[in-house]
Image (cartoon, rainbow, N blue to C red):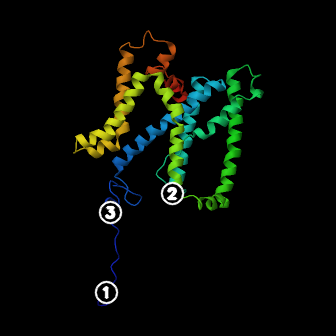
Amino acid sequence: MAGGGKVEELQPHPPREQLPNIYYCITSPPPWPEAILLGFQHYLVMLGTTVLIPTALVPQMGGGNKEKADVIQTLLFVAGLSTLLQSLFGTRLPAVIGGSYTFVPTTISIILAGRFSDEVDPVEKFKRIMRAIQGALIVASTLQIVLGFSGLWRNVTRFLSPLSAAPLVALVGFGLYELGFPGVAKCVEIGLPELIIIIFVSQYMPHVIKAGRHVFDRFAVIFAVVIVWIYAHLLTVGGAYDNASPRTQVTCRTDRAGLIDAAPWLVNAS
């Protein structure tokens, strides 16, 4: 303070001056148009797990395309609601709350339980199993609520260093290979180009085209999904899978998922 004047407050340096290659942080969010595109890209990333989990579990529960569409719609609605709640009142992390593979083994054990084997009607069997899964999830979430609000988990996290987070995230990601790569192998002519395009756009295009480097490395998933879907649709309308096996057609064709036609709000609208 000089001459009785007011002390000038020090202003923090912009994020890009503190951390290389970091352009946005919590206090400096991206512009709304870019934020919407980034949010849509994050939605595409989590859409894979949202669709893959019901695709693997619903047929074992006795459900068809209608039940599968209902489960996917429920997952999307709950994921959006949970994301809004945690971003407004919770930890406020820039993350989308979606389905977790952690619950898949226990869910399969409920599906294979002997008490549901006597049900003949597949739809009624699906409803009974879904009620049992919902009850198990309610009990599990109650335990998590108690651990969170009681502060017990806070005491546990004191013994966890940031170094322990990296192996944990890596192990969770490696666990998805067991489910992801068999799905790629079911239609390798579409799955493999998807992986190659994502790596090429995100890792090589920013070095080739300097002017739009941030566009390519930030929106690599959107570029890859659009290009590969158009490619897959051209193969479908071109008749590449007309004489293929039924399993290949369901996996590779863009018109055999059955989810859009089975969604109630679309059927009623038509």
Q: Residue type at mark 1?
A: Gly
Task: Provide residue 252's location: percent of width, then percent of height.
Answer: 44, 20
Read off the residue under disc 2.
162
Q: Earlier in the sequence, mark 1 or mark 3?
A: 1
Q: Earlier in the sequence, mark 2 or mark 3?
A: 3
Q: CA distance from mark 2 to mark 3?
A: 24 Å
Read off the residue under disc 1.
5
Question: Taking the image as drawn, is residue 94 in sight?
Answer: yes
Task: Provide residue 206's location: percent of width, then percent of height.
Answer: 27, 43
- Image quarter of residue 3: bottom left
Which mark is in front, 1 or 3? 3
Q: Secondary structure at mark 1?
A: loop
Q: Secondary structure at mark 3?
A: loop
Query: On the rendered image, what quadrant is the N terminus found in?
Result: bottom left
Which mark is in front, 2 or 3? 2
Q: Nearer the viewer, residue 181 or 223?
A: 181
- Image quarter of residue 111: top right
Q: Is residue 3 above or below residue 190?
A: below
- Image quarter of residue 57: top right
Question: Taking the image as drawn, is residue 83 in sight?
Answer: no
Task: Provide residue 83's location: percent of width, then percent of height.
Answer: 52, 48
Residue lying furthest top: 243
Query: Badge 2: few (under 14), some or many (20 or more) residues near its Cα, within 10 Å?
Result: few
Q: Are marks 1 and 2 in contact (CB under 8 Å)?
A: no
Q: Is residue 65 above or below residue 29?
A: above
Query: Badge 1: few (under 14), some or many (20 or more) residues near its Cα, within 10 Å?
Result: few
Read off the residue under disc 3.
14
Number of labelled discs? 3
Q: Earlier in the sequence, mark 1 or mark 2?
A: 1
Q: Which residue is located at x 37 percent, y 18 percent? A: 235
